[in-house]
Amino acid sequence: MKRFQCACGAHLFFDNVSCLSCGREVGWCPGCQNMTALEPLPEGGYRCGHADCGAILLKCRNYAEEGVCNRMVPVGADQAAPALCDCCRYNAVIPDLSIDGHRQRWAELEAAKRRLFYTLDLLGLPRGGEAEGFEPPLSFSFMADALPDAGLWRGTGKGEKVYTGHAEGHITINIKETDAVERERLRTDLNESHRTLIGHFRHEIGHYYWEVLVRGRDEARCRPVFGDHDHPSYAEALERYYEQGAPADWRSNFISAYATMHPWEDFAETFAFYLDIASVQDTALHFGLGGGGYTDNLDDMLRSFSWVGLVVNEINRDMGLIDLVPEIITPAIRNKLDYLHALVRGGRQRAAR
Ligand SMILES: [Zn+2]
Ligand SMILES: [Zn+2]
Ligand SMILES: [Zn+2]
Ligand SMILES: [Zn+2]
């Protein structure tokens, strides 16, 4: 994450809606790609507070009306109603806001999604929706399990359980993942080193980029690295994984136990880890912890990531927190990251064209 500054000189955080020091309203300016102080204009709307930008902006509809976003949109020619920003416009389904607590949960999901998009933009990865004719169009649904009818002890039918997952560009996240207690319970049950909202987004977007960058384009090169995604079938692999679990020595070849399930899960898990590395590198650069940020040279990034990981792990242990970077990058995992790095750099060129 970059460093952002308010007009008063105070540090602005990526999630702020006002400056903690001077109280000015703030938001994300798409013009200069910055968090910025908002100067209200007499005729309505705002001016970006960065002198060298000065873009005229409106709040995203989900900022102005729902309080779950902090992004701005450029003022367009025919803006009768406030538009949705470049993150919110990908939403297909939002949580039922008539239910207590759902707005707060939605806000947490949007915050994680904005952080995901920041990293995708940093990497220059292509993305798009139905309106741009993008294949497959990217969209998100944030949904809760349907509650069983009052007084019944059992489920009341199909469709009552929401599975977090990806299908043809559509990413569904069960909003119970915003519940820190539930998440920690699942993390320990499933023996995961981390379980976070941003991690879910990074994993599911990995499936999405398999569709966009690998399917029908790069499968022949992907297969030797991640394995044959057609054999066994996903359904067979899933069944086998839930029966037998991961092989005992999974750490030498896989970034997580779940990655052993099927080549697609391996791809998504490793992709999520690749995004972890890119974000940590970006923050390390901007906050003076060393390294060259997100660059062409994978080995430089991995060296610097390992160093930051070592330091922050020790600091976390000082504070009694879990390790920031529990993963060990073995040669097999480096090989997968190398494939992803080349794929992403290629995808970036495609986006530029
Ligand atoms: Zn300020
Ligand atoms: Zn600006
Ligand atoms: Zn928005
Ligand atoms: Zn998955």
Image: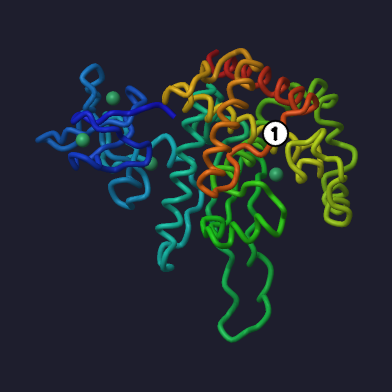
> Quarter of the image containing the C terminus?
top right
* Total numbered labels: 1
Amino acid residing under circle 1: Thr
Residue 216 relative to residue 95: left or right: right
Residue drawn at x 86%, y 47% is 237
Q: Residue at label 1? A: 270
- Tell me if residue 75 can be seen: no
Q: Position of residue 292 (x, y in %)?
A: 52, 16
Between 171 and 105, the one lying in front of the other is 105
Looking at the image, the residue that sits furthest to the front is 318
Q: Quadrant of residue 188?
A: bottom right
Looking at the image, the residue that sits furthest to the left is 42
Between 66 and 32, the one lying in front of the other is 32
Residue 186 relative to residue 68: left or right: right
Q: How is the image coloured?
A: rainbow
Residue drawn at x 85%, y 24% is 224
Residue 133 relative to residue 264: left or right: left
**282 shown above or below 52:** below
Residue drawn at x 48%, y 25% is 284
Q: Position of residue 98 (x, y in %)?
A: 40, 67
